[in-house]
Amino acid sequence: MNAPMFVKSSRIQKAVELINGLDDSKFPLLLNRILQKFHLKEEVFNKEESSKLEISLSVNQEKLKLILQTLTFIFQQAAYHLAKPSVLSQQLQLIELSEEKISAIVQAWVSNAKTVIEKLKKKTIAPKQLNDVNWELRLQTAQSSMSKLKNPVGLVELNLESGEKNEKLQMEFSHKELYTFYNQLEVIQSQLDALR
């Protein structure tokens, strides 16, 4: 069996108890809504919708929040592990979800996994993306006090894109600073290569 995707903590156990108690006819609709909003940085339900949902599911605000967080976490883990339906089902059995709930979760995952994973691939952690780099070398050759001074300065301009907006970040490096920055980039590159 694969490594466990879920740890059976007291919080998970409490959430499982709540989830198992939900109305089976309303549960798939809840799952589909979570999967629709999954890749966005916003709440699954707004305040008004949450209030209606609390009444519909017969739970208070705190319990609803726990249910939504747990179901979102289940789908996050499924996406992270690219879980096949049979594996997801086995993993959910380990935390003692009811067969009806497991079946609904797996069915929702099967129906939405491809779309969710594609959207997550396009989603970025950082709000700004690098789209171009410009650079220039400047050499200061003399000052009144020191006629033979040579002071090279590297200018780097990063063109950043954030949605529709572009901005330029300009940085100035001495030789030593640029060398240190280069070494840090090398470390990052080697760590990225190791993940492949």
Image (cartoon, helix red, strand yellow):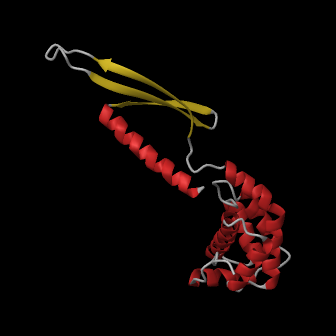
Q: Is 18 on the left or on the right of 153, as rendered? A: right
Q: Who is closer to the viewer here, 184 or 74? A: 184
Residue 68: image x %, image y %? 67, 70
Q: Specify the quadrant of the image occupied by residue 151.
A: top left
Q: Where 28 sits versus 35, above or below?
A: below
Residue 85: image x %, image y %? 79, 72
Q: Residue at x 67, y 67 (%)?
A: 81
Q: Residue furthest left?
A: 145
Q: Who is closer to the viewer here, 5 or 45? A: 5
Q: Is 152 on the left or on the right of 22, as rendered? A: left
Q: Where 121 sits versus 164, above or below?
A: below
Q: Is residue 23 visible?
A: no
Q: Where 26 sits versus 190, above or below?
A: below
Residue 107: image x %, image y %? 83, 71
Q: Residue at x 26, y 16 (%)?
A: 141
Residue 153: image x %, image y %? 33, 26
Total tally of numbered discs in the picture? 0
Q: Is 142 on the left or on the right of 62, as rendered? A: left
Q: Specify the quadrant of the image occupied by residue 148.
A: top left
Q: Which part of the image, by quadrant, shows the C terminus?
A: bottom right
Q: Is residue 94 visible?
A: yes
Q: Residue at x 63, y 38 (%)?
A: 163
Q: Which part of the image, by quadrant, shows the N terminus?
A: bottom right
Q: Who is closer to the viewer here, 5 or 127? A: 5
Q: Where 35 sits versus 97, above or below?
A: above
